[in-house]
Image: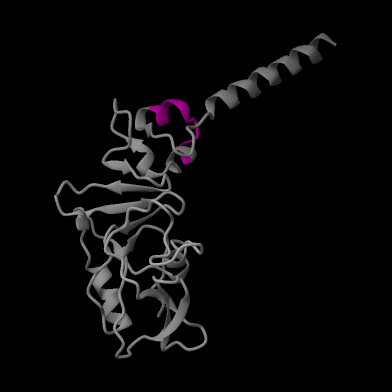
Amino acid sequence: MTRRILFTLSLTMAFCFCLTSLVQAGANDPVTEGWAKNNLVNKKKAAKIPIWQITQEGTASAVNWVNTDNPRFAIYDSDTEDQTDDLILDRETGLVWERSPDTETHSSWTTACNYCYLKELANRKGFRPPTIEELASLVDNDIYNPPLPPGHPFINMQPYYYWSSTTWTGDVSKSWAVVFSTGYLYQHDKEGAIQRYVWCVRGGQGHDGY
């Protein structure tokens, strides 16, 4: 009986120790790298902390990310007076968008894709055209012109069609697009003469759509 009691107590103490060791910050709480190393015994768990929650040691908030009127989004200030150089983090999806989508139209899907691949913003590369799911994830169905969530920080939105990287399965010569006046989704010829806009994104998985 005594051995059984001692064994039970040992298990209970070990369980409590594990729970204490695995405490994590909340979804919106910025953490430091030192905190992560000291509090996360599992390195895989530490690696899953989104990069925008990692801060410089001794600071109280995420580096260069500024909250907006809508807590879903944060602005990365590129330290220039031109707001079109800023980036926007969508905490809901983890994607990083241009604050100001391209205001020039592109005559073909291929041209739009290449434009994003060559994009440089905030001293960063690695941009791409969004998938139709990613582009549609920004749409708020209750709002029009533009159909974006209340308090969003984006600027220079055009109430027209924006390319996605996603090919329409019904016809590989067409790709999906979103019209940012209504939020509706359409299919359009990739190499047609109609001009479309593109809104580049960074992060996530994506695909080339070919």
User: Measuring 40% from the left and 27% from the top, which residue is drawn there?
Assistant: 35
Q: Please state, as top left, top right, bottom left or bottom right, where the N terminus lies in the image.
A: top right
Region of the chain picked out in magenta, as a range: 35-44
- Asked if residue 61 is positioned above or below residue 14 in the image, the reply reads below
Of the pair 67 and 10, the residue shown nearer to us: 67
Magenta segment: does it hold 140? no
**Residue 206: where, in percent of width, then height?**
41, 66
Q: Residue furthest top?
A: 2
Q: How is the image coloured?
A: one colour
**Residue 45: where, in percent of width, then height?**
49, 39
- Asked if residue 61 is positioned above or below residue 188 in the image, the reply reads above
User: Measuring 26% from the left and 41% from the top, which residue is drawn there?
Assistant: 64
User: Measuring 32% from the left and 88% from the top, which residue is drawn there?
Assistant: 191
**Residue 98: where, in percent of width, then height?**
29, 59
Q: Residue furthest right?
A: 1
**Residue 52: where, in percent of width, then height?**
35, 43
Query: What secondary structure predominates along the stretch shown in magenta?
Result: helix
Quadrant of residue 12 within the rendered picture:
top right
Is residue 61 toward the left or the right of residue 185 in the image?
left
Q: How many marks do you count on the picture?
A: 0
- Asked if residue 48 is positioned above or below residue 9 in the image, the reply reads below
Quadrant of residue 108 within the rendered picture:
bottom left
Q: Please state, as top left, top right, bottom left or bottom right, where the C terminus lies in the image.
A: bottom left
User: Measuring 25% from the left and 68% from the top, which residue is drawn there?
Assistant: 102
Of the pair 208 and 70, the residue shown nearer to us: 70
Of the pair 2 and 119, the residue shown nearer to us: 119
Is residue 99 toward the left or the right of residue 8 in the image?
left
Of the pair 113 and 207, the residue shown nearer to us: 113
- Asked if residue 199 is positioned above or below residue 28 in the image, the reply reads below
